[in-house]
Image (cartoon, helix red, strand yellow):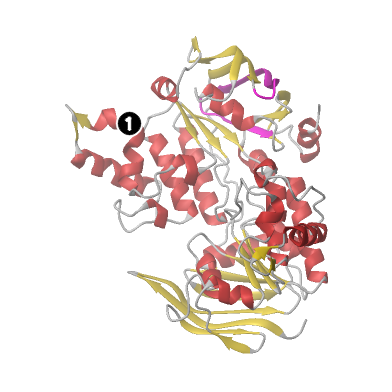
């Protein structure tokens, strides 16, 4: 493991008005797992796009040395031809095609001028065996869970004779079991001679799997640490990432002014008509004024379905029974508009797909939920809209040059802040946060946690859904655990332990 398969020397990449990378140096040893970390906007993905040919030769300065030779990748096809493959957080699979068609999509096995489908199926089965995915290669990708789709992507990369595999946030959308399976597979690939670069915000995974850790901050290389030579603590990585020490990633509230119950879900039962089964059964939860209530459970437990249902967004399901009570008034919201009017807001886990209008600017996105407040007659008061957007830009520290910045150009953490600002402008009494820190860095997480504490101190109530057990336990005053559509336990922050929560999460 002494020689380098990759050396990126003095890489500088500029976009209009922004220097994304500044003389970055990054080296990967042959046959190692190299973790690349940093805050959102630090330049990690940009550096990998330079390597893979997305940002082609001539659009950056510096040298890429791969297998001892200087490379000039002009396209993704050029880097793939050399054995470099990149798998993004948003998977690049075609849902309607079969697994074997996806694995060989773009580099089909030909027999003359036609595709050799028999050989394709055989070779695809071999690739699936390599990633330990025992499925029929003829099934459509859309029928697979996210974890198995991730394995299909890796099988696709292996089918291209990959020598250097880049994984961008590979476990961001996976549950704990799928994450463990994927990390075990990465170790296995390492043993087979595949070098891996992994970008991740999950520091526990990084310290568990990395041979080397490189930290980027503000487009520059801060340090590279050989983890095979010494043990590294998460707090040391955080210090390099954010430029300061964060002793407690979950900030404690000085005063817990928890009051009376302001919101409850009562006897909530929901059916999936297509599968003819109950998704949720007899759910009863409540939240008090100034309280953070966590909602924990494994993937498929029904947490998001519950949140969408009480928010009035149930186009595919049938509510068999149940209602909600907001400040003593019992009802069932027929639409999100009704829920918003009553003081309930829902921050979706899918900020890019359902939470934000990426092509629009910050100002446009923030004002969406409460246009009535900005309307004079039939026109929007643009001056007032600007004032509101600037207030949120400053108050929750959205890092952007102005409120006219397109949301698609923001980092994940700042996109999440815009999404939260949008719902805060609706003036909710109860705020549901679904996976509020998914795919964002530790510094942005800390800011969102601090904002949550500030909101509940001001009297708001928060229901937080998270797949990260440490996050739920670190931030909640009280938590409910779900399993297979049922509430299987309720614990105070003082009562909750990893063992207790997981035992409740696997109850049937």
Q: Looking at this view, is 218 or 99 the one in front?
A: 99
- Residue at left offset 30%, top offset 51%: 403
- Residue 240 figure quarter: bottom right
- Residue at left offset 77%, top offset 76%: 229
Magenta stretch: residue 326 in it? no
Q: Is residue 382 above or below residue 6?
A: above
Q: Give the percent coordinates (x, y) of residue 190.
A: 78, 70
Q: Is residue 4 above or below residue 405?
A: below
**Is disc 1 placed on a helix, strand or loop?**
helix
Q: Is residue 508 left or right of residue 219?
A: right
Q: Which quarter shows the N terminus?
A: bottom right
Q: Give the percent coordinates (x, y) of residue 323.
A: 56, 13
Q: Is residue 383 left or right of residue 102?
A: left
Q: Is residue 489 above or below residue 229?
A: above
By secondary structure, the bulk of the magenta-drawn segment is best described as strand
Q: Which quarter shows the C terminus?
A: top right
Q: Which residue is mark 1?
A: 370
Q: Is residue 357 above or below residue 16?
A: above
Magenta range? 274-296
Residue 40 is at least partly visible in this image: yes
Q: Looking at this view, is 172 or 111 the one in front?
A: 111
Q: Give the percent coordinates (x, y) of residue 371.
A: 29, 32
Q: Looking at this view, is 351 or 386 the one in front?
A: 351
Magenta stretch: residue 294 in it? yes
Count of all numbered marks drawn on residues in the image: 1
């Amino acid at each position: 493991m002494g020689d380098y398969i990759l050396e990126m020397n003095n890489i500088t990449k500029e976009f209009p008005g922004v220097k994304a990378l500044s003389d970055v140096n990054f080296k990967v040893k042959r046959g190692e797992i190299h973790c690349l970390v940093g805050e959102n906007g630090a330049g990690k993905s940009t550096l990998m796009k330079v390597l893979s040919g997305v940002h082609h030769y001539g659009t950056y300065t510096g040298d890429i040395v791969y297998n001892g030779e200087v490379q000039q990748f002009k396209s993704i096809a050029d880097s793939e031809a050399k054995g470099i493959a990149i798998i993004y957080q948003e998977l690049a699979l075609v849902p309607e095609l079969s697994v074997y068609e996806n694995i060989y999509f773009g580099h089909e096995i030909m027999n003359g001028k036609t595709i050799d489908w028999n050989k394709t199926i055989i070779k695809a089965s071999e690739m699936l065996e390599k990633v330990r995915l025992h499925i029929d290669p003829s099934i459509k990708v859309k029928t697979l869970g996210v974890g198995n789709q991730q394995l299909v992507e890796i099988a696709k990369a292996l089918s291209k004779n990959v020598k250097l595999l880049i994984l961008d946030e590979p476990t961001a959308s996976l549950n704990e079991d799928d994450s463990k399976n994927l990390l075990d597979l990465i170790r296995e690939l390492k043993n087979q001679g595949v070098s891996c670069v992994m970008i991740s915000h999950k520091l526990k995974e990084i310290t568990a799997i990395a041979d080397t850790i490189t930290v980027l901050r503000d487009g520059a290389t801060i340090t590279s640490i050989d983890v095979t030579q010494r043990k590294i603590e998460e707090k040391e990585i955080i210090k390099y990432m954010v430029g300061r020490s964060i002793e407690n990633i979950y900030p404690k509230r000085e005063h817990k002014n928890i009051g009376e119950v302001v919101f409850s879900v009562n006897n909530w039962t929901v059916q999936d008509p297509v599968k003819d089964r109950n998704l949720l059964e007899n759910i009863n939860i409540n939240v008090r004024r100034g309280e953070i209530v966590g909602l924990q459970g494994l993937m498929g437990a029904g947490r998001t379905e519950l949140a969408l249902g009480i928010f009035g967004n149930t186009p595919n399901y049938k509510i068999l029974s149940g209602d909600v009570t907001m400040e003593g008034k019992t009802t069932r919201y027929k639409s999100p508009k009704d829920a918003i009017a009553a003081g309930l807001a829902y921050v979706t886990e899918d900020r890019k797909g359902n939470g934000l209008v990426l092509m629009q600017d910050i100002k446009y996105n923030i004002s969406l939920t409460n246009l009535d407040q900005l309307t004079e007659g039939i026109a929007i008061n643009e001056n007032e809209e600007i004032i509101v957007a600037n207030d949120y830009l400053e108050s929750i520290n959205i890092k952007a040059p102005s409120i006219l910045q397109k949301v698609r150009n923001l980092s994940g953490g700042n996109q999440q802040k815009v999404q939260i600002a949008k719902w805060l402008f609706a003036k909710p009494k109860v705020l549901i946060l679904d996976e509020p820190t998914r795919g964002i860095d530790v510094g942005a997480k800390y800011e969102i946690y601090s904002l949550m504490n500030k909101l509940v101190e001001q009297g708001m109530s928060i229901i937080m859904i998270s797949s990260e057990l440490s996050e739920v336990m670190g931030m909640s005053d009280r938590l409910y655990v779900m399993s297979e559509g049922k509430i299987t336990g309720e614990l105070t922050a003082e009562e909750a332990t990893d063992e207790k929560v997981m035992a409740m999460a696997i109850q049937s």
